[in-house]
Amino acid sequence: MTAPAAPGSPPGLLRRIFDSDLWYSFTRSWITMGSGICVLLLVVGALGAPVLAPHDTFDPATLKLMDAFTPPVWVEGGNPTYLIGTDNQGRDMLSTIMFGMRISLLVGFAAVLFSLVLGVGLGLVAGYLGGTIDALIMRVADIKLAFPAILIALLVDGVSRAALPRDMHDQLALYVVVFAIGVSNWVSYARTVRGTVMVERGKDYVQAARVIGIHPAVIMVRHVLPNVMGPVLVIATLGLALAILTEATLSFLGVGVPPTQPSLGTLIRNGNDYLFSGEWWIAIFPGLTLVVLALSVNLLGDWLRDALNPKLR
Amino acid sequence: MKRGLVCAGAALAVGLSGAVEAKTLRWAPQGDAATMDPHSHNAGPTTDLTAQIYEALLQRDPQLKILPQLATEFQSTSPTTWRFKLRPGVKFHNGAAFNADDVVFSVERAMADSSQYKTFTNSVVRAVKIDDLTVDIVTDKPNPLIPAQFTEVRIMDKEWSEANNATKPQNFNAREETFTVRNANGTGPYVLGSRQPDVRTVLTRNADWWGWKDLPRSNVTEVVVTPIANAATRLAALLSGEIDATPNVPVQDVERLRRSQGVKLLQTNEVRVIFLGFDMGRSELLYSDVKGKNPFADLNVRRAVAYAVDVEAIRTRVMRGLSVNTWQMISPGVAQFDASLDAIRPKANIAEAKRYMTAAGYPNGFSVTMDCPNNRYINDEQICQAVVGMLAQIGIRVTLNAMPLATYFPKIGNRDTSFFLLGWGVPTYDAHYSLQLLLQTTDGTANGQWNYTGYSSARFDALVNRMTTELDTRARDAMVKEALQIAQNDLPYIPLHHQVLVWGLRQPVDMPITPNNQPRFQWATVR
């Protein structure tokens, strides 16, 4: 068992990953492998956009209006400079999708992180303390569940638009969207965590910690939290796809990220105007990217749920 | 028996002619009227609706010929007097009789400070009631344009306006709210039924209208106006039959619609020029990173913009060939239009543009915010986006601020802008209208009322003022040409193109397209 460790990495880390149950179950299903590769490709494409993208679509000086509506290269009239065509302003579709995905992923991750912290925090408090506080938090959660997520997101966005001056709103638009999506998705975390915490609370290790006088906050974070993170991880992965789709919906409706920072939803909205006139690639390619991204993340979430569930082993 | 039959036949005939089969026309423009006040906001979408409800003394037919409307005849009785004989027996929608008092009242109302229609009464000294059905319009100097101008001065009921405390037009740029903003009482073929701004306006047929007897084929009893800003949604609504007609077919879909069944397209050149305007009057731009001076005050910068903007690219890509490049502030259809002034438009040339930027002292450019409507002109926001890209190539970093016309017009109306896009139609079909409103020095009268650039040229002002008294057509045309050339040299505006109109109608609908883009529902038939 003296595997040569890769230089620069902690000895045995790779081996530990490849030996783990998770990796085993990952390699067992080609669907999971496929979605893993898809997510990896898309994330690398998005993160590496400033280096990898063939054109810098954020520099208006490079736009050539005369190249607008160039079809994909395999269609008659295509131009090899623009692999999958250009949009109505002559922007390279491939590059806009790569940059757009950055915004989509950024908003998705940030929103998930926000709802995770909010939901897990409230769930921990509710489950551990119980009583009135638990009842209060869970009733708020019930009320929240009575509203569709998209409605809350629209509400938050609308209020912020009315409350903030226009210039400020454009600067803060990204944060507003993150907040709007985060606030609309925290309940599933809170409910799951609360349930698990209520089970864990009665266990001996918690009782022991309590007996020796450790502060409840420390018990919650240091001792209970690690034991509830499994299901939370699953919800977060599934929630990521949901957050990305919600952001795309908001942007498609024109209330999401500002047009200066186009996300996939903004790109689909833009292309929607040209669906009837035959310039299908302007809407279809961002749409396809969104489908592949959301589907892959969802499939990974499903795999994670099954892999972490001891009853399914 | 025979007599009985004749009687029955007559009754049947009366029944047939009296009861029009109820037909609804669903009309979906891109943007909505901003107010129902007929003297408050002089812009196409507003007039398109108010002109269904309110009538003027004269009107234009689809070929833009002047016809009688509320006046039955008119003539010049002295060099400075026009006499109008009014149509007898006309009633307002509330039942009040129409007479000379209403005309005098409405002309004075259109001349008020808060009116945007005072350009049409700019030479009028007063309106004088001769008898109940005769009015004299007295002008300060001979004005051959009075008939053309009085197709746009719409007549309100004096008593109704007084009763509702609306004797002065709503001050549109101050966003004033008066009774006339949401209520209307005209003499026209359609009555304002219900109105939800930007959502749905219902016009119902005024059965008592004087003109129906001349239009036996017209059968539209109700018009439902639902503005749809999104191009794809509007087109889908037309294709699916959710709406019957739209005056704003998205240009990208024209080719496809030509081949499709069930929808017919009407096309005509609109009398409208689309242009960019600079704030060149302020000592410092409101929205720019240049402080202490105004880059647009420098002719070199304006020339640089003119060279950087490639109108041919806009024409072929943004407008899909449905526009005509221009280099002057008036369009074909205006009496003095001279195509040779368009032919001299300089070709786009980035190197030349950069040379002018350097000459102006901005080799690295500057930043500025551009205001742009997004539901007023054909592909207005896309034109602005294209301009943003073109100006970036010479270092002018433009932040685009696109907004619906209800926000846009008050904003630029208060000169709260540094750089903007505007379109200009000419209801009088005479160049003086454009020259006076857009280019003369702003002085509180109709002069420069839409001049948001701060452009002021004594030579230009004097020329346009002289134009109003020049009765010799040839001499006057020469003055118009000279004025247009001054504007071309001074460049307070960069003319882009003349708009081409395309209306889409579903097969059962038949109505004439008009070069002023104004629907006339009384001329429509629905099978």
Image (spheres, coloured by chain):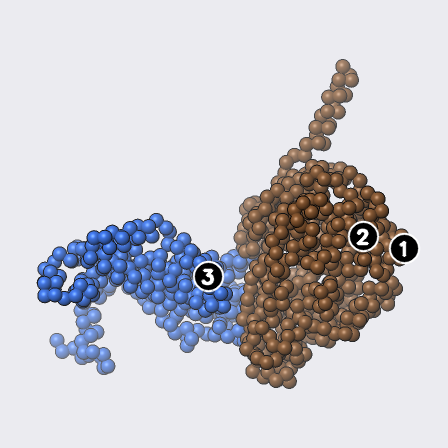
Chain colours: A blue, B brown
Whether callout 3 and callout 2 share a subunit is answered no
Pick the front one: B133 or B152 = B133
Horizontal side of B447 relative to B403 (left or right) equals right
Residue type at numbered disc 1: Ser
Marker disc for residue B127:
2
- Res. A17 in view: yes
Secondary structure under badge 1? strand
Horizontal side of B337 relative to A10 (left or right) equals right
State the separation of the CA atoms marked 3 and 2: 49 Å
Quadrant the N terminus of chain B occupies: top right
Which residue occupies 42% across, 66% down?
A174
Report which residue position mark 3 lands on.
Answer: A163
State the separation of the CA atoms marked 1 and 2: 14 Å
Report which residue position mark 1 lands on.
Answer: B78
Q: Chain of mark 1?
A: B
Q: Residues within 10 Å of mark 1 (few under 14, many from 20)?
A: few
C-beta proximity under 8 Å, tags 1 and 3: no
Which residue occupies 78% across, 16% down?
B2
- N-term mark: 1 or 2: 1
Residue type at numbered disc 3: Ala
